[in-house]
Image (spheres, rainbow, N blue to C red):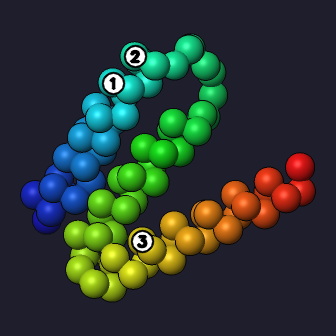
Amino acid sequence: LSKIVYYTFVQNAVFSFIQNGMFKLLFSDEEEGVTDDDIKIVNSMTNNILRGLGIFGATAAMVKDVALLAKNCYELRLS
C-alpha cells in the first residue's frame, strides 16, 4: 500500500513541483499566497493521476478541464 501511495502521489507531486518550480523561479516575481502557478501545479498533478487510471480517468480529466475552461470564460465575461 505504501508503494502505491508513493508512486501515485508523492512522486507525481515532486515531479510537478520541480517542473513548474523551475519556470516560476526563472520567469516570475516573488508573490505571496496562492498564485495561478500553484493552481497549475495542482491541476497538472490531478491530470497525471487521473490519466494514469485509464480511459475513465482520462475522461474525468477532460471533463474537469472543460469545466475549468468554462468557469474562466464565464469570469471573463463578468469582468
Which residue occupies the extreme left position in the image? 3
> Label 3: few (<14), some or many (≥20) within 10 Å?
many
Q: Nearer the viewer, mark 3 or mark 2?
A: 2
Res 32 quadrant in image: top right
The residue to which callout 1 is attached is: 22
Tell me: 71 left or right of 38.
Answer: right
- Residue 26 is tagged as 2
Which residue occupies the extreme right position in the image? 78
Secondary structure, mark 1, is helix
Three-letter residue code for mark 2: Leu
Distance between mark 2 and mark 1 Cα atoms: 6 Å
The residue nearer to you, when weighing 75 against 5, is: 75
Distance between mark 1 and mark 3 Cα atoms: 25 Å
Q: Residue at x 28, y 84 (%)?
A: 55
x and y percentages locating residue 22 in the rendered image? 33, 24
Distance between mark 3 and mark 2 Cα atoms: 29 Å
Tell me: 50 left or right of 7.
Answer: right
Q: Residue at x 42, y 71 (%)?
A: 61
22 to 49, vertically: above or below = above
Secondary structure, mark 3, is helix
40 to 7, vertically: above or below = above
Secondary structure, mark 2, is helix
Callout 3 touching callout 2 (CB < 8 Å) = no
The residue to which callout 3 is attached is: 61
Three-letter residue code for mark 3: Ala
Q: Residue at x 39, y 52 (%)?
A: 44
Callout 2 touching callout 1 (CB < 8 Å) = yes
Q: Give the position of the N terminus as an image quadrant.
A: bottom left
